[in-house]
Image (cartoon, rainbow, N blue to C red):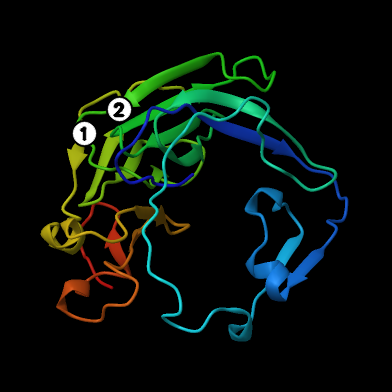
Amino acid sequence: MRTIVPPQLAITVSVLAATVSLSAIAQTTLSGKAAVDADWRKDAPGVRHKITPADLPPPYQTESAVNDARVVARPAGAQLQVPSGFKIEEYASGFRDPRYLLTAPNGDIFVTESRADTIKVLRDANGDGKPEMTETFASDGLKDPFGIAFYPPGPDPQYLYVANTDGVVRFPYRNDDTKARGPLEKLSAELSSGGLLHGGGHWTRDLTFSGDGKKMYVSIGSRSNVSDDSAEANRARIFEFNADGTGQKV
């Protein structure tokens, strides 16, 4: 799943499920001009591109160009390519920019729709591989949510934690809930003081807990790929917090 910059067209994005056997993956290695000029539409698992500096044009030999990505409808029959021995089929569709999946202890699947500021929950009650139910678990108070985690770790969580782009929030949760059973609680874990995160760069925040549930870890990407200045203060780091959002340290 990838972020597409504006302008953005309407799109249906699917969650796909794959099953695997122990078949070996055939390897094909392209090198030289064949690797540089290869048709991306023929890429597949096992196809490798070996490109050395000598295979590339010298710096500044070609003009710079900008060609932003556009979102278009998936052509009929288009599908991911998988290695021999894998099988892939559509599990669910109709999402807007889904970025993160998490399975709850009871088997429900939670999906973060980052640009829609929404978390969905899917349930396959009869075990046929297709969810019969898709519900909006939460949307109020979310800001570009990405990472989610159940707390405490184990079979009986009491909260669903959510990593917004500017802080961590949590919702009361019990197994089998399809709606947040209470209002959002904003924790004191304001990531990098919040304001520093709005200048661009990697906006997604992921989080997880230590095995004993005492510590929470939140990752923050860099503002750019090359900068090393004040704009990168408290970026490209993993922060540690207590489970309630206090006690921040790198």
Q: Residue sitting at 30 percent across and 53 percent down?
A: 243
**Badge 1: residue crowd in 10 Å (few <14, some 14–19, many ≥20):** some
Q: Amino acid at mark 1?
A: Leu
Mark 2 or 1: the one toward you: 2
Q: In the rendered image, which residue does mark 1 sit on?
A: 184
Can you tell which quarter of the image residue 192 is in? bottom left
Q: Residue sitting at 25 percent across and 50 percent down?
A: 165
The front one of 247 and 39 is: 39
Q: Give x and y (percent) for residue 185.
A: 19, 38
Q: Give x and y (percent) for residue 216.
A: 34, 58
Q: Are marks 2 and 1 in contact (CB under 8 Å)?
A: yes
The front one of 46 and 74 is: 74
Q: Secondary structure at mark 1?
A: loop
Q: Is there any visible trace of residue 173 in the rendered image?
A: no
Task: Say above or below: 129 vs 207.
Answer: above
Q: Amino acid at mark 2?
A: Ala
Q: In the rendered image, which residue does mark 2 sit on?
A: 138
